[in-house]
Image (cartoon, rainbow, N blue to C red):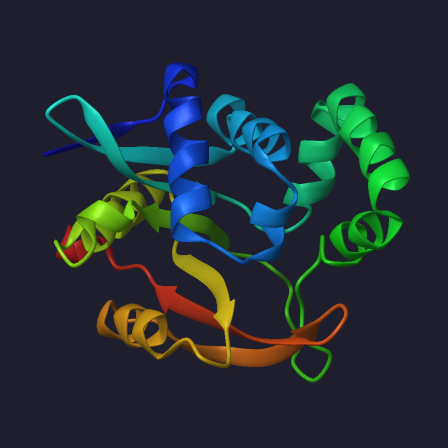
Amino acid sequence: MIIRKATITDLSSITKIHIDAFKGYFLTSLGPQFLDFYYTCFIKSPETETFIAEENGIIIGFAASTKVCKGFNSRLIKRNLVSFGILSLRLLFMSPSTLLRLLKNLKKKGKSVEDNEYYAELYSIGVSSSAQRLGIGKKLLFHTEQALIDAGVDRLSLTTDYYDNDSAIRFYRSMGYETFYEFVTYPNRKMYRLIKKLNRSYK
């Protein structure tokens, strides 16, 4: 198995893995067209690190992160304003409540803890259901961390569900992530923000 930087030719595989790995999640409900747009933005942006795991020419996992969390979503939308506008209009006609939820959740922050967002953020990490429990997620996360260290990043954060999510929480804790704070996204989804101090010495 190899871990390498994602290219635009990997897009359809990344979207398929996302749909497979995140059944029932809000982002998945936005559909393949939105996911194609979303991950195209990550692959093309100079602010991101996007990796795929490949076995015998078949993509079985991916990880997408940004080097600077603060203001990232706003910059992403501005760089891709026309495409985002077209997709937003489509959502507005098909499901206004879905568009409202998307816009309200562009920022994921708690109100009780001061958070200046001066850290990198792991936005998504997914592994095909046929390749679970083989350590692929761990390898993808490790490569992401190393790339961020090389870019001068000293902290990496992520958000994950608070309820019914024990296996994912155990995984992140085993990789050195600690709770930064808890928060609630619109309309009522309780989440953890986890964070890890990246250390060049373990590279």
Image point (28%, 76%), residue name: 170
Q: Is residue 134 above or below residue 177?
A: above
- In this view of the protein, can residue 102 be seen by the observer? yes
Image point (67%, 33%), residue name: 76
Q: Is residue 112 above or below residue 141?
A: below
Image point (31%, 69%), residue name: 172
Q: Residue 64 is drawn in which quadrant? A: top left
Viewer-nearest residue: 167 or 141 = 167
Q: How far from the left and from the top, in percent, is residue 203?
A: 15, 50
Q: Is residue 163 above or below residue 129?
A: below
Q: Residue furthest top?
A: 9
Q: For the N terminus, which image quadrant? A: top left
Image point (88%, 40%), residue name: 92
Image-based side of 46 in relation to 171, left or right: right
Q: Is residue 159 above or below residue 4?
A: below
- In this view of the protein, can residue 153 be seen by the observer? no
Q: How far from the left and from the top, in percent, is residue 79?
A: 71, 24
Viewer-nearest residue: 130 or 38 = 130
Q: Residue furthest bottom?
A: 112
Image-based side of 116 in relation to 162, left or right: right
Q: Residue 182 is drawn in which quadrant? A: bottom right
Q: How far from the left and from the top, in percent, is residue 101?
A: 78, 57
Q: How far from the left and from the top, in percent, is residue 162?
A: 51, 79
| Total numbered badges shown on the rendered structure | 0
